[in-house]
Amino acid sequence: MTAWPEHPVIYEINTIIWLGELSSRYGHPVTLGEIPEAAWDEVALPGVDAVWLMGVWERSPAGLEIALRDASLQESFRAALPDLRPEDVAGSPYCVRNYVVDTSLGGPEGLAAARAQLAARSVRLILDYVPNHVAPDHPWLTERPGCLVQGTPDDLARDPAAFLEAGGKVFARGRDPYFAPWPDVVQLNAFSDELRTAAVDTLTSIADQADGVRCDMAMLLMTDVFAKTWGERAGTAQAEDFWPYTIPKVRERHPDFLFVAEAYWDLEWALQQQGFDHCYDKRLYDRLLHEGADSVHGHLQADVRYQRGLVRFLENHDEPRAAATLSPERERAAAVTIATLSGATLWHEGQFEGRKVRPPVFLSRRPEEPVDKELLAFHHQLLAAVASSGMRTGGEWQLLDCTGWPDNPTHENLVAWSWTTDSRRHLVVVNLSEQPAQGRVRLPWTDLRGGSRQLTELLSELTYDRDGDELVDAGLYVELEGLRWHLLAVMP
C-alpha cells in the first residue's frame, strides 16, 4: 500500500458493538475474522482511508468488577440502554489487561484477517494505545512494577481512592491533573526507563498488526503535564520527553506508521513537534457547536502546517452524538466544513445514520434507533464527492476572506477556503448562521481572467457561469440561506 495521504479520512468503529450487531444480523457469532464482505463494504466506503477499530484489546476482569460496583456508571449505562442486561457490560476498552486482541473478538488471527480485508479495499487499520495507565490486573504490576507510579502503605491508608495494593506493593491509580483518580486503572510512570522500553515494545507490537495508532490522552505523558500531576512521586524527569523518545524508535521498524493523539488543553502543536502526525482539534469542535463564523475563521487562520496535523470531527466515542446536539441543517453545514478542511477527518460509526444515543464504552450493546436515510445519503454523497474531487490528496489549502458592504454585514457569517492542485480548483463557502448571508469571495487564481468560467456544485447538478475578471477582482458574489453552502469545482 502507498504512503498515508496527507489529509486522511478515518472512520471509527466501536468494535464490540459492531460485531454484536453483525452477529444478530447474520444469525450466528461473527468475529473479526468472519465478517462478511458486504459488511466490510459498508464501512470501507469510497473516501475512507482508514478504519479505527476501537477497543480490540483484552479488557480487564478486575476493571469490570469495579465498573459493576460503581453506582454512577450503572446509572449512565441504564440511561443509554434502558433494558440493560448484566451481559451487556463488557468493561472499559481503556482498562487494558493485555495488548492482545480479545479472544471473544477473534484474537490476533481475526485481526490479521480484518486488516487483510481492509487492505484489499485500499483502507488502512488504526488501533488504540493507552499510554497513561493499565488495568489493575495487568501483568506489569507483578512482573514490571518499575513501570508504574508507586506509593506507600501510609498513602493507601490515607487515601484509598487514589491508591491500591497489588502483589504486596502499593500503586497509584491513574489520573490527570484536573480530576479525581480513575478507580479502575493504575498509573504508568512517564519518567521510568523501564516503562519507556516497555512502551516501545508495546507500540512496535501494535505497529506489527496495524497501520496507525490513536494514543489515548497523549498529553498526559508530556514532561510538564506529568510533573504537574505527580511531582516528586514520579522521580526525576528525563532529559527527553516521552514521545520524542518513543515514536522514533517505533518508526525505525515501521517508518510509515501513523501516530494520532487525543489531545486537549491547547497542546496540539507541542505534540506535533514531539512526533505526532495528527492531534484532535477539540477547539474547532467547540467553535462549530457553540460559536459563530468569526470564531471559526479565526481558528482557521493558524499556520497551514499546524492545521495539516489536526483531526477534525463532530463526534467520537467521548462526545455526544452530532444528531443529538445539532439541528439537521447545522449538522450538514458542519459536516461540509470538516470534510473539506486540511488535516485529517474523523467520522464516527452511527454518525451518518443519525444515531442520537452515545453508549458508554463499557457496553457491548446499544439501543436500536431508526436510520435517518436522508442524512445517510447526504454523508455518503459528501464523502464520495470530496474523495473524487482530489482535494484531500495533497493539494494546497488556503483560507479566503469574505467581504461585504457597510449596510450589510451578513458576510461575517460566511467562511470560505480553496483547494488548488495541478489540474483542479475547488471553492468551499459555508454560511454558519441561521440567517441569510451575502458577500463576495475573492478567488486566488489569477488565470481565471479573460472569459467566462464555469462553477459546478459537487453535491448537486447546478452550474454557474461567471466572468473570470470579476471572480479575481471583485470576487464571487455569494448569497446563501442560513446553514447552507457552496462546494464548487472551478474550471480554469
Image (cartoon, helix red, strand yellow):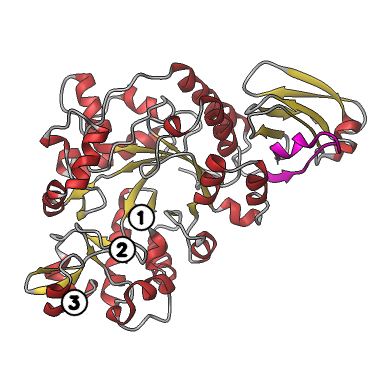
| Outermost residue, front side | 407
Q: Is mark 2 on a helix, strand or loop?
A: loop
Q: How crowded is mark 1: few (under 14 residues within 10 Å), some or many (20 or more)?
A: some
Residue 174's quadrant in the figure? bottom left
Q: Is the residue 54 above or below the residue 36 in the image?
A: below
Residue 353 image-quadrant placement: top left
Mark 2 or mark 3: whose residue is earlier in sequence: 2
The alpha-carbon separation of the residues under discs 3 and 1 comes to 24 Å
In the image, which is nearer the foreground, mark 2 or mark 3? 3
Q: What element carries label 3?
A: loop
* Segment tinted magenta in the rendering: 396-418
Q: Residues within 10 Å of mark 2 (few under 14, many from 20)?
A: many
Q: Name the residue under label 1.
A: 216
Q: Where is residue 308 in the image (x, y as percent from the top left)?
A: 58, 51
Q: What mark, if any, has residue 151 been given in the picture?
A: 3
166 on left or right of 452? left
Residue 166, placed above or below residue 216: below
Q: What element carries label 1?
A: loop
Alpha carbons under labels 2 and 3: distance apart: 17 Å
Location of residue 273 in the rendering, given as x and y in whole percent from the top left corner: 53, 65
Task: Please give the residue where the numbered disc 2 appears in the rendered image.
Answer: 132
